[in-house]
Amino acid sequence: MHSYTPAEKRERNKLLRKGFRQALADCVDPALEARLDKIDQKAAERGAQELRALYKVQADARQALANAKAAERTAPRADRAAARLARRAAEDAVRRAERAVLRAEG
């Protein structure tokens, strides 16, 4: 996963256009390729860090769902409706976290 900042996207696109023109002339500057590699490496590191954070959010959401299910099962009759709402909210949070992870991985 790569996570480019807006400035990196602009610079990368500019360098790619310049590299395309140089490739047509068959004289690509190695400094240009090095700069592109550096931008890609920074974006890959940032993307990996963001993916690790998403995995942590997903794990935390799953743990919160497990806690909510346990609370619902052990709640007295008067508190069961509130516990059911909390479980449903926890399920929604798990689904959101899983979708975010899938988007980031894909």
Image (tube, rainbow, N blue to C red):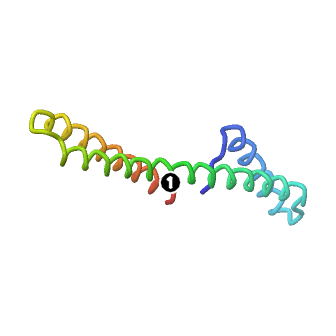
Q: Quadrant of residue 1?
A: bottom right
Percent across and percent down for residue 72 are: 20, 44
Type of the residue with mark 1: Tyr
Q: Camera-side residue: 58 or 105? A: 58
Percent across and percent down for residue 28 are: 87, 61
Percent across and percent down for residue 35 are: 83, 52
**Residue at the extreme left of the image, as rendered:** 77
Name the residue: 72% across, 43% down: 8
Q: Camera-side residue: 65 or 29? A: 65
Name the residue: 35% across, 43% down: 93
> Is residue 51 left or right of 67 when viewed as pictured?
right
Q: Which residue is mark 1?
A: 55
Circle 1: is it few (<14), some (14-19), or many (20+) Cα within 10 Å? some
> Is residue 41 left or right of 31 when viewed as pictured?
left
**Residue at the extreme bottom of the image, as rendered:** 26
Q: Camera-side residue: 22 or 55? A: 55
Q: Camera-side residue: 96 or 85? A: 85
> Is residue 11 left or right of 63 when viewed as pictured?
right
Q: Quadrant of residue 41?
A: bottom right
Name the residue: 90% across, 58% down: 29
Q: Quadrant of residue 25?
A: bottom right
**SS type, badge 1:** helix
Name the residue: 13% across, 39% down: 76
| Number of disc labels | 1
Percent across and percent down for residue 89 are: 28, 40
